[in-house]
Amino acid sequence: MSSLVITRIGQIVSGAIEQPLLAGDTVVVRAGRIAAIGHYADLDTRGIDRVIDAAGCQLWPGLIDSHTHPVTGDYTPRQQMVGFIESGLHGGVTRIISAGEVHLPGRPKDAAGTKALAIVGAKASAVFRPSGVKILAGSLILEHGLVEADFAELWREGVRVVGEIGLSGIYRPEDARPMVEWARACGMTVMMHIGGASIPGSSVLGAREALAILPDIASHTNGGPTAAPIADIERIILESEMMIELVQAGNTQRAGAIARMASRYNALHRVIIGTDTPSGTGVIPLGVLRTMAWVASLGEVAPALAVAMASGNTARLYKLDEGVVRVGNAADLLLVDAPIGSEAHDALATLAIGDTPAVAAVIIDGVVRVNVSRNTPGSVRKVRIPWSV
Ligand SMILES: [Zn+2]
């Protein structure tokens, strides 16, 4: 079931920023993992009877949304909507990462409560896979009263991420910095809200706070939704090694400006792409694709590098065995193309002109989960998958 061959690929886009394009027209998947990449005539496809004809579509890694706010299941209380994760799958997203489950109605704001929320989120998301989509959640929301031993306990119980600093009671550098050190000592990845306050009760945070707190990720540097001064982002790029996140639910103009700035300072390997949804801005199933199009068109970044920002860059940070088309990695893959009617002739060219590519198929762990997206426009080239999905 999870072994297949994808042939007649127009272009293989790796998701690895150091080598974004790969030679070949075929990818072989065995037992859910990428087994071989190259030209069909050179590859061993014995024993695999499921063959997908990509018909010239491009193959990309499955997209990773680096910034989401799930709560439980495939339901968001913020927009009272069911099925947003599955809808995002139709926009090419095969993994979402929680920036904190802050929309839980009645979210506890004490140490025991916030620990419990993180542990439940981590354990549930490790098991729950809506339509196959992978979820990294249980992202700890820092609150007063947490002590060093709590972080070791949380790590043992599966918590891997500290959600956005700035959405809770802990946001002053003197409060946050020790907790960040405790979290990092365990191996956790730390996010921090950058920019104007997102909702009543959250904080305004800029370069001064980020450079004092030193998270791993400067979240939504183009605003979530209100952008910080551009000079603050320049300082973060120049004076730290933080990942620089760009999101859909932010400032469009700044997404382009920050992408150009990251190019200028040779920091494209640090840029990651997310949606910052569900949020007050809504649910945007094509949000990662649209942000990639902003980065490529307004930010004048090579489109294959924009793909890496929404896959391999994030996978590297979280040490995920996906997000890059590489032998041995999980076979989380997309077949994509120019949408019907676009001036562009293929999926990368579509990003370059600011259109949203068409998702023709989505594969997770070698299993076809989407055969023709219901959310993107139709593709010019028609993928043939000769079994029912
Ligand atoms: Zn935020």
Image: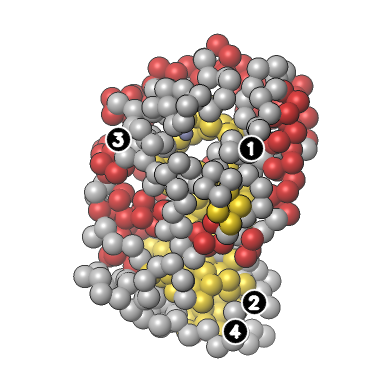
CA separation in Å, label 1 and label 2: 42 Å
Q: Would residue 329 be visible to someone looking at this image?
A: no
Please name the amino acid that badge 2 sits on: Ser
What colouring method underlies this structural image?
A: secondary structure
Residue 105 numbered tag:
1
x%, y% of residue 290?
A: 36, 55
Dot 4 or dot 3, earlier in sequence:
3
Dot 3 or dot 2, earlier in sequence:
2
Residue that appears at 67% across and 40% down: 138
Dot 2 or dot 4, earlier in sequence:
2
Location of the C terminus by quadrant is bottom right
Residue that appears at 75% across and 33% down: 116
Residue that numbered label 4 is attached to = 388
> Please, what secondary structure does the residue beneath circle 3 have?
loop
Residue 3 numbered tag:
2
- The mark lying in front, picked from 4 and 3, is 4
Callout 4–callout 3 Cβ contact below 8 Å? no
On the rendered structure, is 204 left or right of 62?
left
Please name the amino acid that badge 3 sits on: Tyr
Please name the amino acid that badge 1 sits on: Pro
Please name the amino acid that badge 4 sits on: Ser
- The mark lying in front, picked from 3 and 1, is 1
Residue that numbered label 3 is attached to = 265
CA separation in Å, label 3 and label 1: 42 Å
> Please, what secondary structure does the residue beneath circle 4 have?
loop
CA separation in Å, label 2 and label 4: 15 Å
